[in-house]
């Protein structure tokens, strides 16, 4: 059984065993810390319950048409929302909730120098000090595609072939970057700046114009109930937006 299917089955069991009013939410992996905090605030302030599943936006976009029981989808790439909306699986095209940023994440003591323009990465590769670099899989993870674009901008994509370690999503790529599986990684800034990772690492923000904008959009699915709608509305309130901003996301105007 694949890891994605196992997680989906466990998620369904959790929903069945919990409150009928629980809102089931599929969320991009870069939201792990920010959305967990927002959900806890929502539950404390309004009651109810939110069940969060984190993973690759591309995987969720494939699971929803197959009947996955999510009521709200927060994608790291708005194109997945538009695709599902065209299939009439969503209530509408939703709302842009954040603009993501990319960072070079290095374990403390890494032979790679931390700089956002990746000069230290290039130097470590040239001297043989860099053996492995972790990124999310560009095939289905928006942050993986952004990492590839940044590496291409730095002229490092081709030289790094055979040295890239692909995470199923950006959170797994961050785990690889700090676990010894690689000497570093290119991951979400929102993960790199979290206290859990920051105490074990150093990070440098990659310029926003080095990759296509990570326009992150959310929308309710056709199966959304009242609790999911309440949480969707809460995510658009100033208190929730402030949490996104504090975790390193840029806030959209619209």
Image: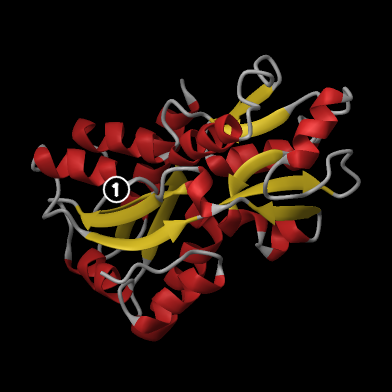
Quarter of the image for residue 220 reads bottom left
User: Residue 25: in sight, yes or no?
Assistant: no
Q: Is residue 228 left or right of residue 138?
A: left
Q: Position of residue 161 (x, y in %)?
A: 65, 16
Outermost residue toward the top? 162
Q: Is residue 165 left or right of residue 88?
A: right
Q: Residue at x 41, y 76 (%)?
A: 240
Q: Residue at x 38, y 41 (%)?
A: 57
- Could you say which is closer to the camera, residue 164 or residue 158? 158
Q: Is residue 22 above or below residue 75?
A: below
Q: Secondary structure at mark 1?
A: helix
Q: Position of residue 34 (x, y in %)?
A: 51, 65
Q: Position of residue 39 (x, y in %)?
A: 43, 69
Q: Residue at x 60, y 33 (%)?
A: 151
Q: Is residue 110 left or right of residue 174?
A: right
Q: Quadrant of the C terminus?
A: bottom left
Q: Is residue 124 left or right of residue 42?
A: right
Q: Residue at x 87, y 42 (%)?
A: 110
Badge 1: residue crowd in 10 Å (few <14, some 14–19, many ≥20): many
Q: Position of residue 135 (x, y in %)?
A: 60, 34
- Could you say which is closer to the camera, residue 63 or residue 123? 123
Colour convention: secondary structure
Q: Is residue 39 above or below residue 206?
A: below
Number of numbered discs overlaid on the protein picture = 1
- Could you say which is closer to the camera, residue 87 or residue 109? 109
Q: Which residue is mark 1?
A: 78
User: Residue 212: in sight, yes or no?
Assistant: yes
């Amino acid at each position: 059984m694949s890891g994605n299917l196992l997680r989906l089955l466990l998620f369904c069991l959790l929903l069945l065993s919990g409150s009928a009013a629980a809102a089931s939410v599929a969320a991009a992996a870069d939201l792990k810390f920010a959305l967990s905090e927002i959900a806890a605030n929502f539950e404390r302030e309004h009651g109810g319950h939110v069940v969060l599943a984190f993973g690759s936006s591309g995987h969720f976009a494939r699971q929803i048409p197959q009947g996955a029981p999510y009521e709200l989808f927060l994608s790291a790439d708005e194109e997945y929302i538009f695709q599902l909306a065209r299939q009439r699986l969503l209530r509408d095209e939703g709302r842009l909730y954040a603009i993501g940023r990319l960072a070079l994440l290095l374990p403390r003591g890494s032979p790679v120098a931390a700089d956002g323009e990746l000069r230290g990465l290039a130097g470590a590769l040239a001297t043989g000090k860099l053996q492995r670099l972790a990124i999310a899989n560009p095939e289905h993870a928006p942050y993986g595609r952004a990492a590839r674009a940044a590496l291409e901008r730095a002229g490092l994509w081709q030289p790094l072939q055979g040295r890239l370690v692909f995470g199923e999503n950006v959170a797994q790529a961050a785990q690889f970057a700090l676990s010894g599986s690689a000497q570093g990684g290119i991951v979400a800034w929102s993960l790199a700046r979290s206290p859990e990772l920051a105490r074990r690492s150093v990070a440098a923000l990659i310029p926003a114009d080095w990759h296509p904008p990570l326009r992150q959009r959310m929308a309710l699915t056709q199966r959304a109930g009242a609790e999911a709608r309440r949480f969707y509305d809460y995510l658009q309130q100033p208190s929730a937006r402030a949490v996104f901003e504090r975790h390193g996301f840029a806030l959209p105007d619209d």
